[in-house]
Image (tube, rainbow, N blue to C red):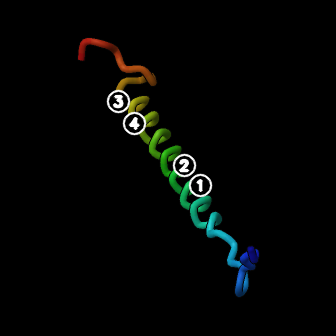
Amino acid sequence: MAQLTPTGPRVPPQNDLYTFHLIVAAALLLVGIIYVAVQTLTYFGTFIPPSGG
């Protein structure tokens, strides 16, 4: 039985694009967490608001 050989050039997978999107998503999440923390600190004076509304 003959072995199959790849024909043409091998194209590397596009993992860099997914890595870039993962880094951007993580950065936006971090910015959002910091924004919420600053707003909470501004409104309540602490990171954990008091219970009871």
Q: Distance between the residues labelled 1 and 3?
A: 30 Å
Counting labels gives: 4
Q: Which callout, 3 or 2, points at the residue further toward the start of the chain?
A: 2
Badge 2 local density, few (<14 within 10 Å), some, or many (20+)? few
Where residue 23 is drawn, which disc sits there? 1
Q: What element carries label 2?
A: helix
Determine the residue positioned at 49% across, 51% down.
28
- Which residue is denoted by mark 3 in the rendering? 43
- Which residue is denoted by mark 2 in the rendering? 26
Say which of marks 2 and 4 sits in front.
Answer: 2
Q: Which callout, 2 or 4, points at the residue further toward the start of the chain?
A: 2
Under mark 4, the amino acid is: Gln
Q: In this view, does 34 lie above or below 52?
A: below
Q: Is mark 1 on a helix, strand or loop?
A: helix
Q: How far apart are marks 2 and 1 (CA)?
A: 5 Å
Q: Which callout, 1 or 4, points at the residue further toward the start of the chain?
A: 1
Tell me whether circle 2 and circle 4 mark residues in contact (CB < 8 Å). no
Instruction: Indicate the position of residue 1 as horizontal and vertical percent values.
Output: 74, 74
Tell me whether circle 3 and circle 4 mark residues in contact (CB < 8 Å). yes
Q: Which of 11 and 37 is in front in this view?
A: 11
Determine the residue positioned at 39% across, 30% down.
40
Tell me whether circle 2 and circle 1 mark residues in contact (CB < 8 Å). yes
Under mark 1, the amino acid is: Ile
**In what quadrant of the picture does the C terminus appear?**
top left
Q: Which callout, 1 or 3, points at the residue further toward the start of the chain?
A: 1
Badge 1 local density, few (<14 within 10 Å), some, or many (20+)? few
